[in-house]
Image: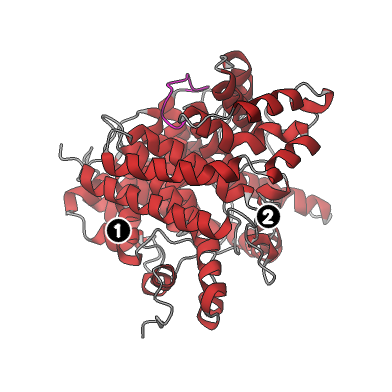
Amino acid sequence: MTKNLSHEDIARRFVEAKVFDFSAMGKIITELGSELAVNDQGWHGVNFGRYNILACMLPAADVARLVGSLRTAALTASVLEGAVDASLPK
Amino acid sequence: MSRWSEADLEARLCRTLDFATKTLDCFAIDGYSDKESPVFGFGPEKPVAETAMLVYAASGCGHRPNVASRVNELARLLVPHARSERVLIDIALHPSLAFKFSVPHVLLTRLGYRDASFDGFLRSCLSSQARNGHERPPSASLERRWISSLWTGQDTDTASRTDLLNSVLNWPVDILGGLRDDAYAFTHLIFYCTDFGFQNRRLPRRRSIILGEASSLLARYMDGEDYDLAGEILLAWPLTGAAWTPSAAFGFRVLASVEDQVGMLPCGNINVARLTKMEGEERSRYALGTAYHTAYVMGFLCAASLRPGRLPPTKIAGPRFEKSCLSRLLRCVDDDQGHWQSEFSNLAEDEQRVLAPLVLDIAIVQKCRKHEYEAVSDILSLACEYRIASSPMCGQAAELLERIANCSTAIGALRGEGTERTMPPAPGL
């Protein structure tokens, strides 16, 4: 936070000064920025056994990292419960 | 105010502890190797250390017989892995990482499972000149001091203070642009600083400010269905002994509901198509290897919430924001994103109105994720109109938009175009 300014002050300052079209920049950033987002691998690219910094963290699968359908996610639980023959819900 | 059922939290914790037994059974000797996605592989140290931390955290509920029996059983299972030949060799070869490899040993020692021979060996390695020959960020340094203080019983307050002052608990964490590692550093600093709720150490900034940032981080990761991080972030409330805010109480409710629907708290790392094709032991190991950590997080959260006075509320209570404000914010939210939405729909209207600041943060994070900055600007205007732009998310989103506008100017200059906007001077560091 900028010194002596609250978050609300910062937001208000921006809103009052707004004279910019963000659409074009959004497109440029979408084109160039995705590379950085995908590369969010940092420390967790090296796990604990290989001398990671922190013991307890989960590596990122991809940029979205969505669990998605909970019914589909339940397949993992069913596998772990020993229901090897469980099939994906229709 | 009505509180979450202790019996329910205890049952969830016991389920996680049972899960930990399976995890040790599968991975405590050889870890997990994933040939298709090596990043998901891990050595045995990881699940052993994490299980030891889970057991240590759960021991705070040791007065509950169901928890105590599982804690003791897991501790007994951990002992040979915590002090294995492999661990001894690792410490001998890497004395600067001695405490890292000793995490399970030290935590077991605190639980009463001592080993004087291991202590003597560890002491001898820590007298090596290379004992401090490893560079660490503040969160890892604090972890080392935490384990060291548990082992020696000596206070490390002054040195820990220095780590905290250099960490993201003292400097605003980058909510919108930060990497997951930054969020993990934030959550782990709270784990170690509070000794998983056993100590009440002074935080580097006011607790309310840190929890404000935790709320905005929660909005980002809960909406992203990253329940591993969302759960770790939620731990900030019970571990610091703070009252559950409406956003945190709702976050807990979402995670509990997701856990109920799935059977465990799911993570986003599992490739369901791959899982479906696998068979037998390979299938079980893949499912467990990718899922166990997130399941543990729910156990940590329930253990911390079972401490005296830290039960989450069952109702979302607080100041109610204007109906028109919530309604306009909800129109800015993608309705197909995040499992929080169905839980939100189930709330009474009064409870929904309390959560307008959380919905605001989520709307901002969704638009930023898609680089729809014009929409972010509109949302900030709306927030200012209703005087609810007080979250760190709002402040950082406004600064992000200012940087983007200045970036446009800089790009224009790079391309030899005339500058349309004068950049403000850079603030002092």
- What is the spatial separation of the Cα atoms under label 1 and label 2, in whole angstroms? 30 Å
- In this view, the residue in front, B409 or B231, is B231
The chain identifier of the residue carrying mark 1 reads B
Local SS, label 1: helix
Quadrant of image for the N terminus of chain A? top right
B373 to B189, vertically: above or below: below
Secondary structure predominantly adopted by residues drawn in magenta: loop
- Residues marked 1 and 2, same chain: no
Task: Give the class, few, some or many, for how many residues have Cα within 10 Å of label 2's Cα (few <14, many ≥20).
Answer: some
Quadrant of image for the C terminus of chain A? bottom left
At x 36%, y 37%, the residue is B304
Residue bearing the label numbered 2: A41
Residue bearing the label numbered 1: B257
Query: Where does residue B140 sit, x and y in percent of width and height?
Result: 64, 34
The chain identifier of the residue carrying mark 2 reads A
Query: What's the amino acid at mark 1?
Result: Ser
Query: Where does residue B117 sit, x and y in percent of width and height?
Result: 64, 28
- In this view, the residue in front, B334 or A67, is A67
B12 to B116, vertically: above or below: below
Q: In this picture, which residue range is highlighted in magenta?
A: B195-205
Local SS, label 2: loop
Q: Is residue B89 visible?
A: yes
Left or right, B364 with respect to B89, comes to left
Query: Magenta span has B243?
Result: no
At x 40%, y 40%, the residue is B72
At x 27%, y 29%, the residue is B308
Query: What's the amino acid at mark 2?
Result: Gln
Task: Give the class, few, some or many, for how many residues have Cα within 10 Å of label 1's Cα (few <14, many ≥20).
Answer: some
Query: Where does residue B135 sit, x and y in percent of width and height?
Result: 76, 32
B271 to B246, vertically: above or below: below
- In this view, the residue in front, B167 or A58, is A58
Q: Which mark is residue B364?
A: none
